[in-house]
Image (cartoon, rainbow, N blue to C red):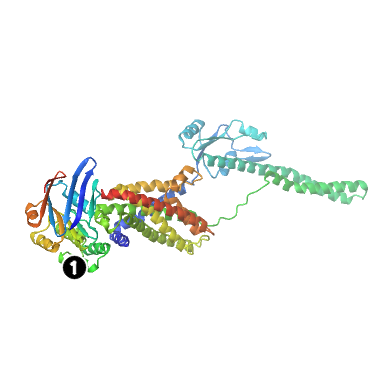
Amino acid sequence: MTLVRAEGVAKRFGRRTALAPLDFELAAGETVALVGPNGAGKSTLISLLARATRPSAGRVEWAEGIRVGWAPQRAAQYARLTARENLELFARLEQVPAAAAEALLERFELPSDRLSGELSVGNQQRLNIAIALLGRPDVLLLDEPTASLDPEQRRRLWETVGDTAVLFATQRLDEAERRADRVIALRDGEVVAA
Amino acid sequence: MRAILRKDLLLLRRSPLLLGLLLAYPLLVALLISVVVGYANTKPRVALVDRDGLPATVELAGEKFDVRELIERVSSEVDLVEMAPDEAERQLETGRVVAAVVVPRGFVSDLRASRSPELVLERGTGGLTPIVTREMEALVFNLNRELQDAIVATNLGYVEPLRERLDRTSELLGELPAGPGVEEIRGFVTVAGLALAQTETALRATASPIRLRLAPERGRTWALSAQVQAYGLALAITFLGLVLAAGALAAERDENVIGRLARGLVTLGRLVWAKAALAAVVALALGLALAVVFGVAVEVGDVAGGEPWARLPLLAAGLALAGGSVGALGALVGALAREGRTASLVAVLVVLPILLVGLVPPEVSPAAGYVSDAFPFAHAVDFFLASLYETEPWRHVAEQAAWLAALGLAYGGAARVAARRLLA
């Protein structure tokens, strides 16, 4: 079953093409890795699929009723709220019980009462991923989720993800090969291998 | 939307310095503008050019006048500065003086000869010219009145000996034997006495048919006036609401959260209205605090007039509505600026002209009135004035509420469209 489909989706910033038109599908239970150097278009594709950015062309469709979790490369959370307050706020917005926030706080071993802006980069990234997981998503879109995590934290992240469909961006080829069912290579906004 | 509003209020509470500045700065601006407006009432500077060489005193109808002292005394509403003709001309051209009163050659000789001498008023082209012209007309009127009073007094001095003689004649007639001739003379003396008795009243009435009697001053002082309160409230919430909403919306992008929210958690429209609601809540809190302080000052000062307490609920509704309307404008600024610091700077740059143009009375500049109509500030002022001071405020309040709601919806709609830029 296809959960997310992109048809001819493209993004331009002024005259610069960040992503040339491409088609993409993600099926239930599938894990797909996006690899490529900086500026290849990985983050752009993920934010387009997350509907956090409007495409310049093409369209993105989600299967009806599915829930999508998105963790951008740069943490998307309020720096002057604590980790707990961030999770509780997004739990309210996702319309899930506050207990879900508490459970993620414990699972990711986050310092609950420190302002998120004062957390280490690794903890900020874990909070970022925890927020993405709040709504019990059917699809996870993760932009370089393990870049700031130590090996133990990486292992626990993938355990937490379980069999949820995942599209993740990474610059680590070993991680892509180990975790992904498919690997898509991007360069200068175009698919160079799939 | 409530979750975002609660989050914004929590963030605001966590930034006491920012909150303090946001509260104190508009109050400081309101105070400074009040001081400037107060200075606008200071006397205009007018040159006095004496081309006739006024003597120390001029004798008219037996009365001695110090004409220069008289001119200065009756020109209390302008700052009259004596200067040479060329200096006065230069200062008039450069705007250092707004007008020059010239005493032309022959003034005193015409005055002595009762030939109605002229004072010449040379005027600049500045905005104060009509006011100065009225002040100078008042000056000439007052001069004439002072001279008339003196001349009337002198003329009455001529009448007094006649009345004394008539009284003595009447006494002498009483000592003479009665006869038709004596009766006729007595009749004449009686009529002449009555006529002379009316002379003083008639002369004074001719000099001043209508007199202005100044009643003792009463009512609120300038600092506690209705205008100061209404402008102070509107200025404070306009500044606060615009800067706050602009910064808060742009901050969603700065925090990189806008994409996460707009993915389906909070629509861009609700996000915009959440910022307008934030401005409304803060405007309500600040406005009510200011209104209470003002009401206490009015009570302590035992000042009559206005409805400081009974109309608080109506004022509260106006504060929230005006705050929301201003907040919608702020959200538009925030969406267009996209970035927090830019949004705050642009908001400050936008708010100052809105406030200043709103302070210009429409009677002075209709164009300023039309421009003000397009922004919530002037309508907020009118709403607050009506709600606090008018006996029957409802029609006026309803009109201004409709303006504020319409402007809020228009700016909010525009902000919703512009907010797409935040996702680019």
- Whether residue B225 is visible, yes or no, is no
User: B111 or B226: nearer the eye?
Assistant: B226
Secondary structure at numbered mark 1: helix
Question: In the figure, B88 relative to B40: above or below?
Answer: above
- Whether residue A16 is visible, yes or no, is yes
Q: Position of residue A20 (x, y in %)?
A: 18, 44
Which amino acid type corresponds to the residue marked 1 in the rendered image? Answer: Ala
| Residue identified by numbered label 1 | A103
User: B128 or B277: nearer the eye?
Assistant: B277
Screen quadrant of the N terminus of chain B? bottom left
Q: Specify whether B196 is left or right of A104.
A: right
**Chain letter behind tag 1:** A
Q: Position of residue B18 (x, y in %)?
A: 30, 56
Q: Specify whether B421 is left or right of B309.
A: left
Mark 1: give few (<14), some (14-19) or many (20+) Cα within 10 Å.
few
Q: Position of residue B71 (x, y in %)?
A: 58, 40
User: A110 or A135: nearer the eye?
Assistant: A135
Q: Position of residue A162 (x, y in %)?
A: 13, 63
Q: Specify whether B275 is left or right of A46.
A: right
Residue farthest toward the front in the current orientation of the protein: A1
